[in-house]
Image: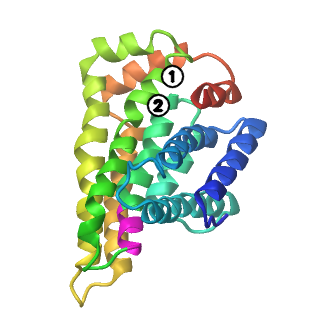
Amino acid sequence: MTATTIDEVLGFLDEIIETSKEEQSTLGYFAALYRKVTQQVKDKIGQHFFDDDARMELLDVTFANRYLAAYTGYKAGTEITESWQVAFEASENSKLIVLQHLLAGMNAHINLDLGIAAAEITDTQTIHSLQGDFNKINDILGALVGEVEKDLSEIWPFLLWILKVTKKVDNFLINFSMNIAREGAWLFANELVFRDAGTTLNEMIAKRDKKIAKLGQSIVKPGRIERFIFRIIRFGERGTVADKITALQN
């Protein structure tokens, strides 16, 4: 799966979603949510939202191809980044709630892939001009947590109430989405572009990957209080995996 246009990205995501439904695979959770975000980006192209529509589509496609490559690599049993390995292996753990699966995917894709994609389409002369559009797409990505909570309330109506009354869990989500993903991805992109001559791109990515994989583990295996609350949520989740994927799509 290698896309050249945003429409091809959407097509590949549709394939992953349908395959996941057929296989009752939780890999479809992130794909369903990611498709909604990609559609939002596509809808804003040509609407004077982005500073450079062509560049934004290039960023979107470059960004998406890292997820598509990781997905196909995992399915084929070939080596992928540690961050994605953590997220995809989580699909085999039936004790995790949908929210954890989504956050694990967001962690790998935003905290690792987004910065790499931005660095790939720019250089030291052009990266600064990307910041405005980068922040706009990051705003769309940053809104994922709220979108997740809204969609998952269809799977378990009491979810929003639980998240509000258990501030520790709500902070768990806010700290991840706001403090790390939004700021870290842009800083990482700049570090890659302005790296020292003696430092290779692969070395920097590998170092970042280990850090993000560790963060992914904290999502899959959170603290005692979060874990207890997640068990309550997991018990209340209703429907098959395919039903939950459909809820995320709608």
Image position, residue 64 (x, y; %): 53, 58
Is 84 or 34 nearer to us in this picture? 34
Quadrant into which the C terminus falls: top right
Whether residue 119 is in magenta: the answer is: yes
Tell me the residue that label 1 is attached to: 152
Tell me the residue that label 2 is attached to: 99
Crowd band around label 2 with a 10 angstrom C-alpha radius: few (<14), some (14–19), many (20+): many
* Distance from the alpha carbon under mark 2 to that under mark 1: 8 Å
* Left or right of 193 in this view: 157: right
Image position, residue 26 (x, y; %): 62, 38
Q: Residue at coordinates 52% horizontally, 30% vertically from top-left? A: 98
Regarding residue 96, the answer to whether it shows in the image is no
Relative to 196, residue 240 above or below: above
* Quarter of the view holding residue 192: bottom left
Q: Residue at coordinates 40% horizontally, 50% vertically from top-left? A: 48
Instruction: Give the residues in magenta.
Output: 115-121
Relative to 39, residue 4 above or below: below
Image position, residue 173 (x, y; %): 32, 32
Kind of residue indicated by mark 1: Leu
> How many marks overall?
2
Label 2–label 1 contact, CB within 8 A:
yes
Whether residue 214 is in magenta: the answer is: no
